Image (cartoon, grey):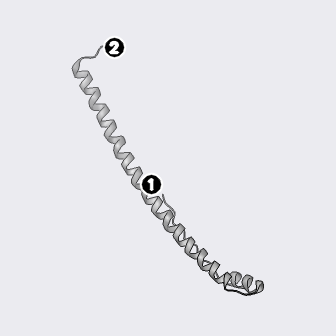
Amino acid sequence: MSVYNKEELLKMLEGIQEDVEGLDFLLRNRNEKVKQDIIRHERTLDHLEKELTALESRCFNTQEEKEYVTTILKRPVSLKLELGS
């Protein structure tokens, strides 16, 4: 078992404290980036949900299958994707 004097122990504790503070900073930054990614993905899902609802609405309002297919093929669907880092 190693024996340390008080000064060595204090230096070790200071180093540990600096490491903990650095890790805490990195973790807070990562958590913020994850939150931002979640918000971007939620926006993308909201947009896709609106597009799907609009598409379903158009399809259900069409009487014949032929019109239904033609309507889908003629109208471009906008898919907005937001990608995080």
- Disc 2 designates what residue? 2
Name the kind of residue labelled 2 in the image. Answer: Ser
- Disc 1 designates what residue? 34
- Residue 67 coordinates in the image, percent (x, y): 74, 87
Q: Residues within 10 Å of mark 1 (few under 14, many from 20)?
A: some
Find residue 34 and report its image quarter.
bottom left
Label located before the other in sequence (2 or 1): 2
Find residue 71 and report its image quarter.
bottom right
Marks counted in the figure total 2
Question: For numbered disc 1, what is the local secondary structure?
Answer: helix
Mark 2 vs mark 1: give the one in front. 1
- Residue 37 coordinates in the image, percent (x, y): 47, 59
Residue at image point 73% right, 87% down:
63
Find residue 49 and report its image quarter.
bottom right
Marks 2/1: CA distance?
Answer: 43 Å
- Residue 26 coordinates in the image, percent (x, y): 38, 46
